[in-house]
Amino acid sequence: MRIGILDIQGSVEEHKKKLFQLGVKPIMVKSAEDFERLDGLIIPGGESTTIGLLLETGGLKKALVKAVRCGMAVWGTCAGAILLSKFGLIDIEIERNAYGRQIDSFETEIAFLGKTIPAVFIRAPKIRSAGKPVEILSEYGDSKTAVRQGKILATSFHPEMTDDRTVHRYFLKMC
């Protein structure tokens, strides 16, 4: 299985560590050509505006969108989820920094497909609504925190910042 991590900015190392723990050696994606050999891609959390600009100026956005539309699995965490929505790859409405500023970041537990897992919210977005083809995998309060549409997964929280591997295992099964 060939899983890539978009290596532009954000929680790259944390996702890399989780994949290694699950026996997967990730491919660090830095060029458009890297998408051609992937079964799945993780777009890490970070700053969505910065990541989006770097994707655009580096010519990676077009290759990313094409790869996903051709069937590559993709998972966006936090900023990555925002970009999946912004690029029209998943039918959700998402609000940036909806839980507040950096100082308002928090850890809690949520139910993910019936299992309680730890969740870290860092300037996290809220998934306000989801279209009919979107499956809701978890919620916190009035907001969806994990959703899936086909081979596209979006989480508003950071599973890579905890010791739990549930969401990473789930994504690998999607690939």
Image: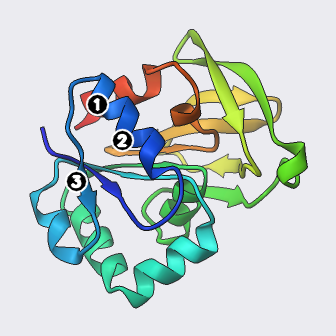
Asked whether the residues under the numbered discs 1 and 2 touch, taking CB atoms below 8 Å apart as contact, a structural biologist would say yes
Determine the residue positioned at 43% across, 46% down.
13
Q: Secondary structure at mark 3?
A: loop
- Identify residue type, mark 1: Phe
Residue identifier under label 1: 20
Q: Secondary structure at mark 2?
A: helix
The image shows residue 95, relative to residue 127, as above or below, that is below
Mark 1–mark 2 Cα distance, whole angstroms, equals: 6 Å
Q: Is residue 106 left or right of residue 60?
A: right
Label 2 packing within 10 angstroms: few (<14), some (14-19), many (20+): many
The disc placed on residue 16 is 2
Determine the residue positioned at 30% across, 69% down.
64
Asked whether the residues under the numbered discs 1 and 3 touch, taking CB atoms below 8 Å apart as contact, a structural biologist would say no
Label 3 packing within 10 angstroms: few (<14), some (14-19), many (20+): many
Determine the residue positioned at 68% across, 48% down.
127
Q: Nearer the viewer, mark 3 or mark 2?
A: 2
The outermost residue toward the bottom is 57
- Identify residue type, mark 2: Lys
Residue identifier under label 3: 72
The image shows residue 1, relative to residue 46, as above or below, that is above
- Identify residue type, mark 3: Met
Looking at the rendering, which quadrant does residue 142 occupy? top right
The image shows residue 152, relative to residue 174, as above or below, that is below
Question: Considering only order in the chain, which callout, 2 or 3, is on the residue closer to the N terminus?
Answer: 2
Mark 1–mark 3 Cα distance, whole angstroms, equals: 20 Å
Q: Quadrant of the N terminus?
A: top left
Q: Is residue 5 left or right of residue 160?
A: left
